[in-house]
Amino acid sequence: MRAGSAFRRCTKDGCRANVAASVRACPKCGGHSLSWAFVIDLALPGSKRKQRFGSGFATKAAALEAMNRLQAAVVDGTHVERSRRTLGAYLEDWLAARNDIRRPFPKVATVRCLPLPHTAARPIAA
Ligand SMILES: [Zn+2]
């Protein structure tokens, strides 16, 4: 994995300028809303970039800690990418691929009728 980096930036809408660690105000807009952020690249060197950002950290140490946690999760295989795919869509595909399951088996429609019907419409990983 490529090395990530932490940086400080203005959080004012429309500005987002990178600022030095020592300044008290954004040199571009004069705003005082500054925070630390990080960026890492999940792709292997030589392949297309797959950047992930984290922001809103009060200190550089906090940003680096979050960055290291994310990198460790990617290496461990425990990191789950954000997705808009819903549980219902996942179950439809899962059931369609499982021709070995004998009937009767609860259909996806049954899942939609569970006590929490909104569950099937929720993203798996938000
Ligand atoms: Zn600014």
Image (tube, helix red, strand yellow):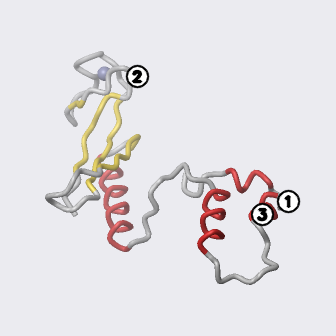
Q: Could you tell whether 124 is left or right of 3 in the image?
A: right
Q: Position of residue 26 (x, y in %)?
A: 27, 22
Q: Which mark is residue 111?
A: 3
Which amino acid type corresponds to the residue marked 2 in the rendered image? Asp
Q: Is residue 85 above or below residue 91?
A: above
What residue is rendered at 32% in x and 43% in y? Answer: 37
Mark 1: secondary structure: loop
What residue is rendered at 35% in x and 36% in y? Answer: 35
Task: Look at the image and tell me in which quarter the N terminus lies.
Answer: bottom left
What residue is rendered at 29% in x and 52% in y? Answer: 50
Q: Could you tell whether 119 is left or right of 58 in the image?
A: right
Q: Which one is nearer the viewer's eye here, 126 or 61?
A: 126
Instruction: Give how far apart the Cα atoms at labels 2 and 1 are.
Output: 41 Å
Q: Quadrant of residue 12?
A: top left
Nearest-to-viewer mark from 3 and 2: 3
- Mark 3 or mark 2: which comes first in sequence? 2
Q: Which residue is mark 1?
A: 115
Instruction: Give how far apart the Cα atoms at labels 3 and 1 are.
Output: 9 Å
